[in-house]
Image (cartoon, helix red, strand yellow):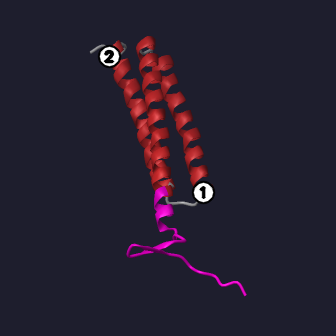
Amino acid sequence: MDPKGPIVAVITALGISVANSWAGYVVSKRAQTKELNSFMGLVFGSLGIRGIIVVTLAYLCLGVLRMHQVSFALTFSISAFAGLMVEVFFFHFSMERTKRQQLANVKRPFKKKGDELVTDSYALA
């Protein structure tokens, strides 16, 4: 296999993109147990660090190793977009699940007793 051929560029770009998405998943899974400020700091901090690492790896692959540019760029851009969409959906569904659990734990103002609806009654004096 030619190290500068399109197949190697595609596999390398997919590997970088998958590793980036996996690292984002791991960090966000650990950050979900923290409070909101820590969560935001961890997620956005990791986003910046992962961005710097990915740009450096892309420069090394395209500039130093002289991989096939079109194959690498197209594969990386499509897979990075797909990975970003997966991260957004992951955050959306985890926040919806958390919201549903919190709403289920809230005490309802009305209680069912048999078929009757019982409410707390207040007497006006």
Q: Residue at x 49, y 24 (%)?
A: 58
| Pick the front one: 64 or 124 | 124
Mark toward the viewer: 2 or 1: 1
Determine which of the numbered discs, if any, sits on residue 36 in the image. 1
Residue 113 in the image: above or below residue 82:
below
Residue 112 on the magenta segment:
yes
In the image, residue 17 above or below residue 29: above
Q: Amino acid at mark 2?
A: Ile
Percent coordinates x, y for residue 30 in the rendering? 47, 55
Q: SS class of the residue under badge 2? A: helix
Classify residue 43 as left or right of residue 8. Answer: right
Q: Position of residue 72 (x, y in %)?
A: 43, 18
Task: Name the residue located 50 percent from the left edge and 51 percent from the top edge.
Answer: 95
Secondary structure state at the residue bearing disc 1: helix
User: Which residue corresponds to the image point at 46% horizontal and 28% vertical from the top-left?
Assistant: 80
Bin the neighbour count of mark 2 within 10 Å (Cα to Cα): few under 14, some 14-19, many 20 and up: some
What segment is highlighted magenta in the picture? 100-125
> Which residue lies under the disc numbered 2?
7
Q: Amino acid at mark 1?
A: Leu
**Is residue 68 in sight in this rendering?**
no
**Coordinates of residue 63 in the picture (x, y in percent):** 51, 17
Q: Is residue 39 left or right of residue 77?
A: right
Residue 62 visible to the viewer: yes
Task: Indicate whether 77 appears above or below 87.
Answer: above
Q: Is residue 14 left or right of residue 80?
A: left
Image quadrant in which the C terminus is located? bottom right
Would residue 95 be counted in the magenta stretch?
no
Q: Categorize mark 1 by other alpha carbons within 10 Å: few (<14), some (14-19), many (20+).
A: few
